Image (cartoon, grey):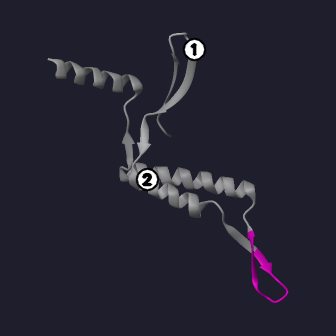
Amino acid sequence: MSKEQVYIRSQYSNSQVEVGIEALEMPNMEARFAMAMIEKWGCIQGTDGGEDSAGRAKTDLMPVDATVKRACNLAQTAFHEFKELGWLIDVPSKEEAEEIFRKAQDEKSS
């Protein structure tokens, strides 16, 4: 399960409200590379399409629902492995980042 945080805040001084989601965990370079490979290779699979009249093998595309199920299975398995390998990076929330920045500014000015 990925770590995400939903926030609601006033975006501008005119009190326009913004709803968003910020990630509290991000994939590192290895994980992003693996996801790129999954995008290229993992979703479209051929299935046995029998033979043509000359006896050559034919390949049919995997049905859409099976493709979606496979993509979800790949993603779930990949992120489980990313977590096991320590390839997921914890990212501070917006509030935590602001606090870290404030502390660094305070230390800089003192």
Mark before the other along the chain sequence, 1 or 2:
1
Residue that carries the numbered disc 1 in the rendered image: 16
Q: From this view, report whether residue 29 is shown above or below residue 53.
A: above
Relative image position of residue 64 (x, y in whole percent):
74, 56
Residue at the image point whose x is 72% and y is 70% from the top: 47
Relative image position of residue 43 (x, y in whole percent):
63, 59
How far apart are labels 1 and 2 at the CA level? 36 Å
Q: From this view, report whether residue 90 is shown above or below residue 83.
A: above
Residue at the image point whose x is 52% and y is 61% from the top: 37
Residue that carries the numbered disc 2 in the rendered image: 31
Query: Would you identify the image quadrant in which residue 73 lies?
Result: bottom right
Q: Nearer the viewer, residue 104 or 77?
A: 104
Q: Residue furthest bottom?
A: 54
What is the quadrant of the C terminus in the image?
top left
Magenta region: which residues? 49-60
Residue at the image point whose x is 72% and y is 64% from the top: 62
Secondary element under disc 1, as helix, strand or loop, is loop
Q: Which amino acid does the dot numbered 1 rest on?
A: Gln
Q: Residues within 10 Å of mark 1 (few under 14, many from 20)?
A: few
Q: Nearer the viewer, residue 17 or 5?
A: 17
Q: Residue furthest right?
A: 53
Horizontal relation, residue 48 to residue 109: left or right: right
Q: Tell me if residue 62 is in the magenta stretch.
A: no
Q: Nearer the viewer, residue 42 or 12?
A: 12
Q: Residue furthest left?
A: 110
